[in-house]
Structure formats: structure tokens, C-alpha cells
Amino acid sequence: MTTMENNSSKKISSSKLEETLVSTFPRICTDCGKLTNKQFFLTNPVLHSTTLNSFLMNSNSNYVIARFAIEEFYEGEIFFILTVKEAVTIGSLVLTLDDAAVRENAGKGVLDGDCLDAYKEFSNQVCGMLDNELRPKVPKPIHLKLTSTTLINKENINTVLSEETLNEECLILTAAMRILGFDDGQFVLSISKLIGEEFFSEVIEENDKSFKGIILAVDDSNTDLRIIRKFLSSEYKVMVASNPNDALSMLQRSHIDLVLMDIYMPVVDGLTLCERIKRNAMSSNIPIIICSSSPTQTNVIQAIRAGAVDFLVKPFTRQKLIEKINKHFVKDSLILTR
């Protein structure tokens, strides 16, 4: 079996995301079995944290990468990755070639013409299966769409994928893939860690990773929450809430060191939420920084009166955000470096 793990990958703790992705395997096995007319098995799933660059470059294999765009509420991509040999095997099976011809094609490792089209059909089917399985399970609307199926190797990796995509921390789910009668391989799904965490508003941690503290970000803008997590999640455990009720619940269940809160939110605004937090004996000592993209002098005065320790103007840089956190963070010994 081809192995694509490397020393830079880190096993992470179990999560709702992993549980949900693994729960799609029975459907994928059944439908892929029908498509290839072979028994199809996915077993021994493992979720790791790494970068696509490390994952792909630390192997001598060439790959085929299918990109599934994540649309509707969530924004991002899921990457479906197989070695060229595995893709040729599957493409040849979809073309209903006999087993000897499939093995010959796989040995040559050439994915072109009809075989490539057949593999694209297979990738589109996998995309549809994931879409059908994930849609009722994630809390907010989601749709997956196949956008491309591309051969990738060490020579063209920087033209196929952007530098940001290659070097962003991602969650990679690998499973042993067996097509009865053929060599075993690996079935691989990859998703940005930030997007993966967004699905269920969870923090997916590496085993034994220590954080400098816990920050709760409260904002009805999914984009702004994503920016905050991107700026801070390498050092801090960042919990997010898109509405005040969820924020209050998190404050009751978890130890929070600092709250970042938008001033304008529907139903209950940031000022009212700030006052509620300060009236509760369990959370009254937690420092609160209120944010706004259209600040006024009145906003700042109202925020301070409501109990906030500071005010932050959007859009902010990572440096400015860190400066505010370092100024007010309760644990003086846990200061975030720039």
C-alpha cells in the first residue's frame, strides 16, 4: 500500500468533522463498488494535521487531485487525492476493461484520453456522494461541486496550487483503500483546518498540543471569524460563536481568557451582550474587546461603559490584534509573539 504520511504530519484528537467524514464511507464504498463493478472497501481512517505541500512533496509518487468547491454558507475546497496508479486503475474499471488490461494500464501509470474522462466521472460521483452525505449533517447550508481534476507532481505543484493553499495548515483524512483483486492504495481527503473547524464550530487540536490561552470570538460575520482564527489559532485556542446565545453558552461551559466581540449583531448587539457577561459573577472578570468596522466616539464610550476594556477598529492587522490581546490578556506570562 502506498503511504503518504510524513514526519511533519501530526495525529490530532477525534472531532465531529472526522466522525462525519468517516460516516460517509459506507455510502462511498457502496456507490463506488457499483461504478467500478468491484467490491470497494475503505478502512482504518486517520486524521492528521499538516500542509498539502509537506504531504505531497514528501513522497515519490505522482498524484491526481480533484478539487471540490465548497459553496453556499461555507467557502473553501475539499481535495480528493489519489496516486496516478490508483486513478488509472479506477478509470480503467469505469471503462469496464478486463482485469488484465486494468493491471497493464496501472503498471504503465498513464492517465489520458478515455481513462482520464472515466476518472473524472468517478471523482464527480465521489463529490456527489460527499455532498449528499454532508448536507444533512453540517449545521448550515453546504454544496460541493467538482471544479477540476488535475495531474500533480513535484514539477508542476506550484502552478496547480497556490502558495497559500500549499502552505495553509490542513486536515488530511487517509483511509486504506481496497478494490478487490487489485493492489491496495490510499483514499485521501484534505480540507483547510480553518474551514474544517468551521463546519461544527469546533477546535480540532493536535494531540498534546498546548495553547497560550483560550479566546472566544463573537461575530455574525463568518469571514471575520475566519480572519481572527487565522491570525491567532497557531498560538491560541480560538472558540467562535456567530450569535450571543451560543457565546453565553460557551462562557458557561468553558474557561475563557478573553473575548473579542463585534458591536453590531442581530437580535442582541455587542454592547448588550457585554453587559450580560459582566453581570454574571462567573464571567465578570473576563476582559472584553469590542470591534467595529464603523466606529464612532459614541460607540467607544458606550463600549467602555458596558464593561469592555478596549475597542478595536476593523479591518485590523494581525499585529494590531496581538497588541490589543497582549495589553489585556489576564495571564501575564502568556504573551503572544508577533
Image (spheres, rainbow, N blue to C red):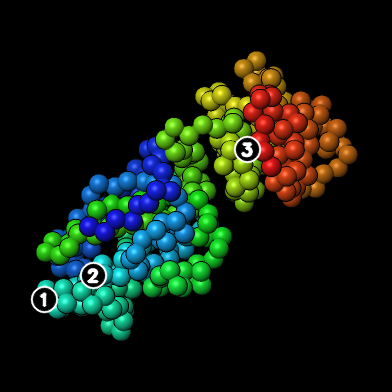
Binning the other alpha carbons within 10 Å of mark 2 as few (below 14), some (14 to 19) or many (20 upward) gives: many
Q: Residue at x 19, y 68 (%)?
A: 36
In the rendered image, residue 268, in percent from the top left (x then y), is placed at 67, 35
Q: Residue at x 48, y 34 (%)?
A: 209
Sequence-wise, the earlier of marks 3 and 2 is 2
Residue 159 visible from this viewpoint: yes
Residue 92 visible from this viewpoint: no
Q: Answer with the quarter of the image where residue 163 lies.
A: bottom right
Circle on res. 100: 1
Q: Answer with the quarter of the image where residue 298 lies.
A: top right
Query: Quick check: marks 1 and 3 in contact, CB under 8 Å?
Result: no
> Which residue type does callout 1 highlight?
Ala
Nearer-the-camera pick, 205 or 248: 205
Nearer-the-camera pick, 42 or 69: 42
Foreground tag (1 vs 3): 1
What element does badge 2 sit on?
helix
Residue for badge 3: 217
Binning the other alpha carbons within 10 Å of mark 1 as few (below 14), some (14 to 19) or many (20 upward) gives: few
Query: Quick check: marks 3 and 2 in contact, CB under 8 Å?
Result: no
Residue for badge 2: 90
Nearer-the-camera pick, 134 or 167: 167
Sequence-wise, the earlier of marks 1 and 2 is 2
Q: Answer with the quarter of the image where residue 120 lies.
A: bottom left
Estimate the spatial distance between the alpha carbons at disc 1 and disc 3, rounded to whole Å: 57 Å
Estimate the spatial distance between the alpha carbons at disc 1 and disc 2, rounded to whole Å: 13 Å
Circle on res. 294: none
What quarter of the picture does the N terminus occupy?
Answer: bottom left
Sequence-wise, the earlier of marks 1 and 3 is 1
On the picture, is 183 further left or further right than 280?
left
Q: Residue at x 46, y 69 (%)?
A: 157
> Which residue type does callout 2 highlight?
Ile
